[in-house]
């Protein structure tokens, strides 16, 4: 049985330094309380050397110009403690949450993974450093001995079984968690170290201090045994930062988000996890506070339990990630598209953990966009054309014409099956697939004819059910008009309702051939039901020959300019103008009569 | 003092000796071709070159989108990531699915302006990893595209060079000029309408009275090779092991067929 204890000295200061690494080398003092009664509660060695004393008034501490003064931050301490626990779980599944600055790990049986106990302690210290904390690590046969050794000795301490008493004897009694009364008693007796306490006879000690004395005696000898109280791993990772001064611009906000993301990603990495989603919450200053531009008003409001405004953003990732730079880009793009309206006084960023994706890379695996890069690209595209206009089209289970929805685009290697796709050049199954494709590509006029004949005999136009999804050479494509164009349709006398002339977009044309009407309807029980008569029409427009032969006029009222997109008219608007001037191109169009709107519309064109 | 070219060359080579192996040698690049999904076009052009810009142009209704769908179908069936920058939001997912395009493999960017289309293409090229990027400017007036600076096309060409990406540009008129490695012009030849057997013997006027007895079957498409960097007659090997026949002609004709239709169509 062996235990490793990790102690983070000067925890309050380290929690602040973790969020502001540039303070590491500078004198720093933390104050707590409301002015003018605020006091220094913690300081680093440089600040103490500069003359700062614990308990000193905040105003007095501010007189030291070389010393940085910060408020004690419970949020940062909470995040630092969570990071400490995460590192503990990255080494052992059995971790005790002893104190905010101390954890204990059961390392029994882990030497086979880390080669030696010394190596394990070094790895532990290194991982704690990676989350921005400096620690003391001690390994001993019992929990309390390990805790006291970590609290009392710098760096890594290894105590062999049976040597606890000797190794701990030099530690001062301040290392114990003692009540002020007991400490005063020991001080009066001249007991300064563990060794002094261990040398006292047990019976007289118990007579004077009771069971507390017996426990202290055992602790001083390193002989106190107890069971580990296991902590439960958190299922959510949160990093928070309360700001002394409100942030209003994206650039400084990105800087702070970058720090939080770095810390979150380090914690996720320590637990061998990635993030499936991020939740950003920004607490905003009320507008009447903005002039004050400091935390005092906010603190008063907070004391009065007035909820500040909040801005929330969710970043859902199609693939689990933990690359902080990529994630920062994605968050920035989201905030650029939709930025908070107000000054930010607190940032809270939480990550939903997910298993990291595992993809084996190799020479013959099909190229696919890098998921991180792809996400950034999609976010940029969404910023350019709108979130609803980027993605993978997905057909919906309806007969309503032109119905689809946009789904997130996921890289081929990250699909649900998770199977790796190999280049067809090296994969027998792919060759077979290709042969199948080649077979489908061969023209089969007789088969198509048979289908058509069968359908016509039955009074039905061949539907898509038989062939949808099959790769087929020469399938005619359809281009949709969005929004659909309104049209005027004329029917000739005696033609039983068949259209003979049509005009739309200011162009008038003759219907050379038509097929229809193909009636569809649905959702009649709902408000947005539809009922349409659809036609395929081959249309020849008037004045079209001039369009074919002539060259386009050089002067147009718009053009591609990289820096002036807002003034560029939409393609539809330009087409509208051009169509009214030069007519529509001949071709086969899909037209329908909408019975609900009582009008004719052009759905699109075959191309 | 006049110096001959050979001397100058030898001096430069000597100066760069040890640092650059062959400063004047142009490295031979092997271009990989993939099928367009239409054998006739493969025979004509040798397929679509990777790492190059391919331009397909033609008037509306000429069949250029059918060619795009065919190429997209072939690429997505090989599980390649494909992207479509839709310059006028004209892509129809239902007909695309019917043409065999695996929509899950397709990133569709719906643009409204020309600037959006070009910037979106820039982003996609910079991202890398896409096997096929299509820029659909089919409904964008040629006058607008004509104003795009030639540097943009050069930038696109440089961006795809040395990558496995096919940049496929669909438009009314060719604009990329020498930046395009392959330029094809397409035009519709004739449309095919099927008339029900009982109407076949009647006159055209008679059959028009009963439009429900007609069926649009498809159209013929003629593709003409305007420019190709692949020398004529050179056999190009596809990566999937199939060889495109040696093409020596200037044009190919193929048929398209209407295979999807709207579900549930019934004559009234």
Image (cartoon, rainbow, N blue to C red):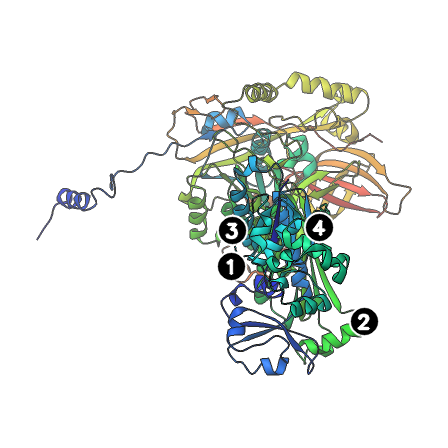
Asked whether residue A168 is in view, the answer is yes
* Image height of B90 relative to B207, above or below: below
Chain on which label 1 sits: A
Q: Nearer the viewer, residue A540 or A462?
A: A462
On the image, the x and y values in percent for residue A192 come to: 61, 64
Residue contact at pointers 2 and 1, CB within 8 angstroms: no
Image location of residue A583, percent across then percent down: 62, 48
Viewer-side label of 2, 1: 2
Tell which residue pokes out farthest to the left in this image: B1
**What residue is shown at x 76% (from left), y 72% (from top)?**
A302
Q: How far apart are the alpha carbons under marks 3 and 2? A: 60 Å
Q: Residues within 10 Å of mark 3 (few under 14, many from 20)?
A: many
The reply to whether label 3 and label 1 mark residues of one chain is no
The image shows residue A73, relative to residue B153, as above or below, that is below
**Dot 2: element:** loop
Q: Quadrant of residue A284 in the image? A: bottom right
The answer to whether residue B144 is above or below residue A27 is: above
Q: Name the residue carrying label 4.
A: A236
Which element type, helix, strand or loop, lies under badge 1? loop
Residue A7 visible at all = no
Question: Could you tell me which quadrant the C terminus of chain A lies in?
Answer: top right
Task: Tell which of A519 and A498 is nearer to you.
Answer: A519
Helix, strand or loop for disc 4: loop
Residue at image mark 2? A305
User: Mark 3 against mark 4, which lies toward the viewer?
Assistant: 4
Which residue was labeled with disc 3?
A: B145
* Disc 1 target residue: A561
Measured Cα–Cα span from mark 2 to mark 1: 53 Å
Image position of A89 (left or right of A48): right
Question: Do marks 3 and 2 share a chain?
Answer: no
């Amino acid at each position: 049985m062996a235990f490793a204890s990790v102690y983070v000295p000067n925890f309050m200061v380290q929690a602040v330094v973790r969020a502001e690494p540039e303070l590491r080398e500078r004198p720093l003092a933390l104050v707590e309380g409301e002015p003018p009664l605020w006091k220094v509660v913690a300081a680093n060695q440089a600040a103490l050397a500069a003359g700062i004393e614990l308990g000193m008034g905040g105003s007095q501490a501010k007189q030291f110009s070389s010393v940085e003064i910060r408020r004690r931050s419970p949020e940062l301490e909470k995040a630092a403690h969570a990071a400490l626990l995460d590192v503990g779980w990255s080494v052992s599944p059995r971790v005790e949450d002893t104190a905010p600055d101390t954890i204990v790990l059961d390392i029994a049986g882990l030497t086979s993974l880390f080669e030696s106990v010394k190596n394990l302690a070094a790895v532990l210290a290194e991982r704690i450093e990676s989350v921005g904390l400096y620690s003391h690590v001690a390994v001993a046969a019992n929990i309390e001995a390990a805790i006291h050794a970590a609290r009392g000795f710098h760096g890594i301490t290894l105590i062999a079984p049976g040597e606890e008493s000797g190794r701990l004897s030099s530690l001062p009694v301040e290392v114990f968690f003692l009540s002020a009364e007991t400490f005063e008693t020991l001080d009066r007796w001249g007991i300064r170290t563990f060794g002094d306490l261990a040398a006292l006879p047990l019976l007289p000690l118990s007579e004077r201090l009771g069971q507390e004395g017996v426990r202290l005696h055992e602790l001083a000898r390193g002989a106190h045994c107890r069971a580990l109280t296991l902590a439960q791993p958190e299922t959510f990772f949160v990093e928070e930062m309360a700001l002394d001064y409100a942030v209003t611009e994206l650039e400084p906000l990105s800087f702070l988000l970058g720090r939080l993301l770095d810390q979150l990603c380090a914690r996720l990495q320590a637990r061998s996890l990635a993030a499936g989603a991020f939740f950003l919450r920004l607490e905003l200053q009320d507008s009447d506070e903005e002039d004050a531009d400091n935390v005092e008003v906010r603190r008063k409001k907070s004391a009065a339990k007035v909820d500040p405004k909040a801005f929330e953003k969710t970043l859902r990732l199609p693939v689990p990630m933990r690359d902080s730079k990529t994630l920062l880009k994605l968050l920035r793009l989201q905030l650029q598209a939709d930025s908070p309206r107000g000054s930010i006084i607190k940032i809270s960023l939480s990550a939903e953990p997910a298993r990291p994706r595992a993809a084996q890379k190799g020479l013959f695996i099909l190229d696919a966009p890098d998921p991180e890069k792809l996400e950034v690209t999609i976010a940029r595209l969404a910023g350019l054309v709108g979130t609803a206009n980027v993605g993978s089209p997905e057909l919906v289970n309806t007969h309503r014409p032109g119905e689809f929805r946009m789904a997130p685009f996921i890289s081929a290697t990250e699909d649900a099956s998770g199977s790796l796709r190999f280049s067809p050049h090296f994969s027998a199954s792919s060759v077979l697939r290709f042969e199948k494709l080649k077979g489908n590509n061969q023209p089969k006029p007789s088969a198509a004819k048979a289908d058509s004949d069968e359908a016509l005999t039955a009074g039905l136009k061949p539907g898509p059910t038989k062939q949808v999804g099959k790769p087929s050479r020469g399938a005619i494509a359809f281009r949709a008009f969005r929004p659909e164009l309104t049209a005027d349709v004329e029917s000739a006398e005696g033609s039983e309702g068949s259209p003979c002339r049509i005009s739309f977009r200011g162009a008038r044309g003759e219907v050379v051939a038509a097929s229809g009407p193909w009636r569809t309807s649905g959702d009649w029980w709902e408000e947005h039901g539809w009922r349409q008569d659809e036609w395929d029409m081959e249309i020849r427009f008037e004045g079209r020959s001039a369009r074919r032969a002539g060259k386009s006029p050089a002067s147009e009222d718009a053009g591609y300019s990289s820096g002036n997109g807002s003034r560029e008219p939409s393609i539809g608007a330009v087409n509208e103008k051009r169509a009214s001037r030069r007519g529509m191109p001949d071709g086969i169009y899909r037209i329908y009569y909408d019975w609900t709107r009582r009008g004719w519309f052009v759905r699109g064109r075959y191309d | 003092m006049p110096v001959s070219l050979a001397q100058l060359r030898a001096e430069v080579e000597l100066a760069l000796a040890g640092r650059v192996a062959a400063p004047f040698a142009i490295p031979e690049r092997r271009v990989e071709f993939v099928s367009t999904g239409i054998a006739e076009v493969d025979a004509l052009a040798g397929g679509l070159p990777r790492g190059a810009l391919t331009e397909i142009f033609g008037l509306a209704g000429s069949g250029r989108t059918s060619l795009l769908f065919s190429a997209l179908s072939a690429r997505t069936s090989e599980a390649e990531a494909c992207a479509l920058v839709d310059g006028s939001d004209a892509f129809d997912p239902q007909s695309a699915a019917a043409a065999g395009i695996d929509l899950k493999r397709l990133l569709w960017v719906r643009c409204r302006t020309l600037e959006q289309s070009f910037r979106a293409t820039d982003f996609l090229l910079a991202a890398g990893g896409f096997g096929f990027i299509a820029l659909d400017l089919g409904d964008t007036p040629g006058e607008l595209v004509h104003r795009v600076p030639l540097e943009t096309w050069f930038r696109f060409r440089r961006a795809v060079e040395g990558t496995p990406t096919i940049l496929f540009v669909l438009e009314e008129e060719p604009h990329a000029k020498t930046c395009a490695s392959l330029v094809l012009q397409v035009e519709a030849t004739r449309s095919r309408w099927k008339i029900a057997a009982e109407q076949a013997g009647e006159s055209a006027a008679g059959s028009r009275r009963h439009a429900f007895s007609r069926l649009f079957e498809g159209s013929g498409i003629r593709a003409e090779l305007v420019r190709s960097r692949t020398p004529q007659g050179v056999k190009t090997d596809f990566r999937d092991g199939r060889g495109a026949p040696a093409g020596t002609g200037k044009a190919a004709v193929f048929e398209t067929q209407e295979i999807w239709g709207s579900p549930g169509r019934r004559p009234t």
